[in-house]
Amino acid sequence: MGVTVKEILQLPSFRGAKVLTGHSNVERTVSSLSVLEVSNADFSSQIVNSVQKEWYAEELVISSLFSIKDSIEKQCETIQYLHDLGEVGLILYYVGIVIPEISVELLKFAESRNFMIICMPENDYTLRYNEVIYEVMEAVVLSQQTINDNFVNESLEKVSLLPEHSRSVEMTLKLLSDRLKANLVLTSSSLDMINRVMWPRNSTLDVSRMIREYAPQLTHGRMKAEEVESAGYIEHRSVHQKNGETLFLFVIKENAKLPPKTIDKIGEVVQVAINLWGDKHNEVSEYALVKAIINDESEKMRRLAHQLHIDVSAIQMMWLVSVQDLSEEKKIREELEEYLAQYYKTAVIQTMEHGIVVLLGNCSYKYNEYEIAAEYMEAARYSSSISKIIYAPRMKNTTDVRRMYQLVNQVGKKVHLIYNHRKLYTAAEIRSMKRAIDLSVQGEEVIEEWLSVIAPVLEDSESIRTLTTYLLDAKGNLDDCAKLLYVHKNTVKYRIKKISEHIGYDITMNSEFYDVYLACMIYRLINS
């Protein structure tokens, strides 16, 4: 199913290359390569997000980081993006020519993420990308010509190593599709499509029509794969859910017929995936819909939304409610349903692994949506059982919903290290927290650079406490800050004025306080 990094490093084109970070990844499998040369990490993210969401769990990236050679921060951001995508590692070219040397900060950051950096021989102008690309892909193609006896275990292990939110039947189908270069379709016993993964992903092959026309004869044994039209060969296997319901897996391969043994093993992989991650995989419920959105099961999401008569395109708001007392979870969900019905025509509220997911749309325009969330937090009967609520407006599509859900899980309990006295947070605050968390692990030099913003008050405990409370806990509100510090409002006003003078930033002005805001986050992270 590919070759390991350890095997790749033995190829002639890698002679003299060194593994600098992420040494534990040498046994990981590689099945593809890509080249990344972009102006900055933000643009890289736009490229990645413009294609179907995948998990690049078996890919190595080749780059010289040419366009960001002078920015350690941008280099670290690029490593973070590649890590978040699940890339195996980075093959770094032309060190000593493009990048004079690899910074200690970059190496520490990559190591903290267990992300592999392979450095090609330094100061060597004769290196060419195509040599590594040719040798690696030749090794990959040779390794994939046969399906061995470990195919089932290897396939399932790859999915099980993914982050929790990516372990799903759909992701299993995507990995199998990439491995076999085939289209995979999972249907109910009545041939309603549940999942569809195309190869290549932008394929225009009308598999829906093929399933409609040929599946009934195939599933009843009245037709063989050889008798199907020239567009492709269709094979199928039955898989079963825990409740005994039968699903059909169709494998559609263009221009070639897969061996029966291969089809059997594909069926085994999907069967185990359904047992592990697809309980009630064809269930029609709001819970199944939310799970499909979060797991990026696009075909399943569209089918469920249609069957449930829910317009997912109307969803423009998400709340993520973390419950610390699980015995109250059902009551909290019922209270949310009752409260939000006053303001939203579309409301999907379901409990997932990490809390209650609330998807909202079609709000009455006479209400301020943030105030709706704030008022709920103030009036909730079970507020003591709620640890936090994330308020995420302007969700343009279900992709935004999924990214925010994943981002909140990445930040996790560190929310309470940064914010000591709050329970309601905005999506913008979560993004800032994630940036502060990333900066806090980039090494001493980066931390010192950021803390230098507030250095003049770091040794004054009263000033640093006032500053962090004012910006983080009180959101720049003098009255709230005074209450939290148990002092008079004028005292806070005086302290803030003196702090602004000392650090050279007017922290009462939005245009000036963002760097100070991030510095305060980093300060709390490393001192909590």
Image (cartoon, rainbow, N blue to C red):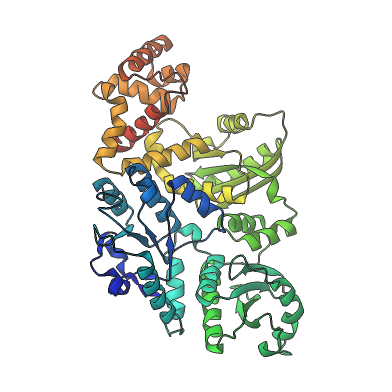
In this figure, what is the number of numbered marks?
A: 0
Q: Is residue 278 above or below residue 151?
A: above
**Quarter of the picture holding the C terminus:** top left
Q: Is residue 52 above or below residue 422?
A: below
Q: Position of residue 220 (x, y in %)?
A: 72, 87
The N terminus lies in quadrant: bottom left
Residue lying at 42% horizontally and 23% vertically, measured from the top left: 512
Residue drawn 44% across the image and 66% down it: 160
Image spot of residue 293 (x, y percent): 60, 55
Give the camera-side residue of 210 and 346: 210
Residue 157, image x, y percentages: 42, 71
Task: Indicate left or right for 339 with 387 as reference.
Answer: right
Residue 369: which quarter of the image? top right
- The quadrant where residue 487 appears: top left
In this rendering, would 229 be left or right of 112? Answer: right
Q: Nearer the viewer, residue 81 or 154?
A: 81
Q: Furthest-front residue in view?
A: 126
Classify residue 195 by image quadrant.
bottom right
Q: Nearer the viewer, residue 434 or 335?
A: 434
At x 50%, y 44%, the residue is 323
Q: Position of residue 91 (x, y in %)?
A: 34, 61
